[in-house]
Structure formats: structure tokens, C-alpha cells
Image (cartoon, rainbow, N blue to C red):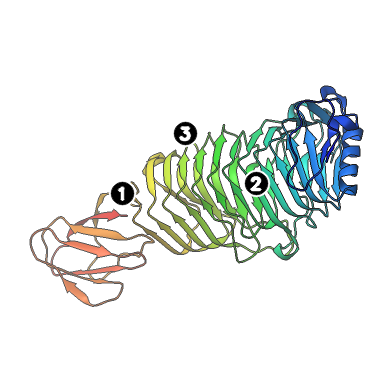
Amino acid sequence: MINGAVGGGAVIPPGPGLDQFNVVAYGAVGDGTTNDTTSIQAAITALIAAGGGELFLPTKTFIVDGLTLANASHVLVSGTGTLKLKGGAGAGASILSITSSSDVTFRDVTIDKNGPNQTNLNFGIIYDTASSSILVDSVNFVNVDAFGFFCPTYVPPAAQAVNVRVINSLIKGVAGTTHSDDLFVIVANGGIFANNTVEATFGPAGTGCYIYESVNVPVTGNTFIGHGGSSSIAITCTVGSSLVCPVTGNTFVLGTNDVAQRIWKEQDNVGAVAQTDGVFSNNMIKGNGGSKGVDVTEASNLVIEGNHFDTMYAGILYDTAGAVDNVLIAGNLFDNIGGGTAFFDLITPTNERRVNNQGYNPVGVVTVAVPATTVAVAAAPYDRTFYITTAAAVSVAIGGGPTITLPITGLSTVRVPAGKTLTPAYATTAPTWVVEGE
């Protein structure tokens, strides 16, 4: 059964078992000027009364302000049309608000936030924590100044919306006239953010995609393109539970001051704890010299592995806001990092290990004087190799272990693992060493 199959462009067959509700048949004009809220809401009301269906948007631009989808299920919003928020919409207005609904899919439509013409803070699509199984597939979000897709309620994972998926979509932000903030905010217990393209000036202090205290929402295969801003961030992942959202296989092309990923503790949720069990792996991060890769603030049990950091101010930044504990940084490639330093440490992490990172030398290849005999060289979070460059009778103890006697003449090499001290002993003058980190 096809409801409203008159005018408004070609009608596509509905999904299996779904009636189709063409918004034009309910009086929507779609001329980019007329406010079509009342007409489209009528189509939605009919759809809900039928127990679900397909809300079809033909190739037109529909101006709306305050559509609602409440207590609905088995809903498909599709077509090649555009839902555009009217200019000057009121504070808190939205294109569509989803409450207490399940099995809601958006496919192929365009959501136009109309950011340059907004004077209040308002929203594109918002959903509440009582909703579940929301799928956004191949949707274009354009002119997003803030909150193109948003859950306004921050709650612990057990009370979050279940299974929120955003795939194959375009999120394109703009600088708003009065508001610029996070383009996407996902609060969910389960879901995915995958194969999307996010392009914007993310700031002044916003994010391209904000995974907010969520659980099991992988972020994978996306492309984030930033054009610079003040402390703008491509993607932020933060949770208040033991399971975090892995960020893998993404491409970041960053402008000045852009940050690829921020891992931190969020303060807005009562009882929020530091992020734990995070993974940032196999990503490509291309900066412009003033960008930053990963900003870690108050987190623990993190793996940063197999990434390529290229042309940025700092590959990995430990911020000052909170403690960082138990971090493995392994197998990353650092190219053209500002000042030759991949890490910018404002704090000293606890239990950090850096191993097998290429193009990164944490202390530089330098000749150093070893301390007085039997005085330990301090431990470092990365493996180090010490090369003797002058002849001397030397023995060493690594990490308080047994004494090892080195040859009196010739080049000798000592391998010192991360977290271990080196205590040399010598009979005459101190040797000199080249110290090389990994």
C-alpha cells in the first residue's frame, strides 16, 4: 500500500511490509520557502497510527521547525528530499525530535541545519534515551553549525539509548553566526560510527563527532577533514564505564590547532570516571605543522598502536587536567613532528611503555656523560640502546639485575628496556655513550 502517491516526483517502493507516506500528499510544498512542518507532521501522525511505515521525501526542499516522532516503531525516512530547519528557529528547536521510539532508519535524505541563518542554539535530529535501534545510513548533514545529530540527556550506560548506528554519511559543518559547537553527539550503549566523512571547522571548541560516555560504539573507517580552529577536535571519545569505543582505521586531515582524538574524563555526568580500556589504532593522521594527534587527559589502560602521525606539532599530548595510567604506545610511525619531538608531556604518565615506534627518538641521538660510577641512569618509558664510544673498563647492571662486564676496548652496546635503570661501574674515567630511544 502506498499512501500519498501523488505528485512530488517518482515514488519508490517501500521497504518490505512498510506502507509509504509521501509528504507531498499531505500538503507539503517543498519549494524551499513554505513552512511545511504542519503537513509533514500530519504524514508522520498517519504513519504512527498505521504501526509504522516509510516517510517518503521526494526531491524537494522542505522547510520545517519542530517535527516530532513519538512512541513509534518500524519507521523509514527516505527519499532524495531535504529537511531544512527554518532560518531564525527558536532556541532548542529541532528539525526532528525522536522520543520513545525504536527501529527508526534514515536513508538517503539530506538534513540541512541551515546554520548560517540561525541566531539561537538549536538542533537537527535529536533522540532521547528511551529510544533504540536508530540507523542513519547514507544521509547528508549539511550547514551544521552545532548539533546536527544529538542526544541531549547524559546518563550512565545502563540508561542510554541502545544501538545507535551512523554509517556511510556526510557531516559537513559551517561556522555559525552565533553558535559553533559539536557537530554530532552520540550517547549510546552499543552502535557504530563508520565510513562517514566529517568536514568542518570544528570549533571554536567543538568536535566533529563526540562519543559521549558511551559503551561499545566503535569509530572506524571514517574520514575527518578539519580546516583549523581554536582547540577544535575531530573526534572525542569519553565514557564513564569500563568499556570504551575503539577508534581504528580512520583518516584525519587536520588544520592548525585541530586535534584528531581527545581521550578524557567528562565532568558533566554525575559520578563520571576516567576513561578506561581505550584503543586508538591503525589511523592515518595528517597535520599541517600546528595540529595535534592524540590528547590524553585523565585516562587509563590505553593502547595507541600502529598509527601514522605526519606533520604536526605533537603526535601524542598528555594534558595537565588529570592523571594518566597504564599506556602502551607501540608500532607508530612519526614523520615531521614539530621540533623533532613526538610526545609533548605536560604530565608524567604512570606505567607508560613506548616501544617500536619509528621516526621517534625521545631523547635524540646524543652523546652523553654517564654519571659517576655506581650511580644509576634514571628509567625511561621507552626502550633505549646505549653505545660506548670511548674505551674504558665498564660493567653495568640493568634494573638492579646482575652485573654485566663489557669489553675494555671496542664498541659495546647495552639494551635497556622501558622502565629499567642502568647502573654503570668503571675503574678509571667515565666512558661516553650514545643514547638512542625507540
Q: Label 2: few (<14), some or many (≥20) within 10 Å?
A: many
| Residues at circles 3 and 1 in contact by the CB criterion of under 8 Å | no
Q: Which residue is mark 2?
A: 166
Residue 234: % across, % down: 58, 42
Check disc 1 and give the amino acid type.
Answer: Gly
Q: Which mark is residue 288?
A: 3
Name the image quarter holding the C terminus.
bottom left
Q: Is residue 137 above or below residue 174?
A: below
Q: Is residue 247 above or below residue 251?
A: below
Check disc 3 and give the amino acid type.
Answer: Asn
Label 3 vs label 2: CA separation? 28 Å
Residue 159 visible here: yes
Q: Residue at x 87, y 41 (%)?
A: 44
Q: Which mark is residue 364?
A: 1
Q: Nearer the viewer, residue 134 or 317?
A: 134
User: Quick check: 337 left or right of 166?
Assistant: left
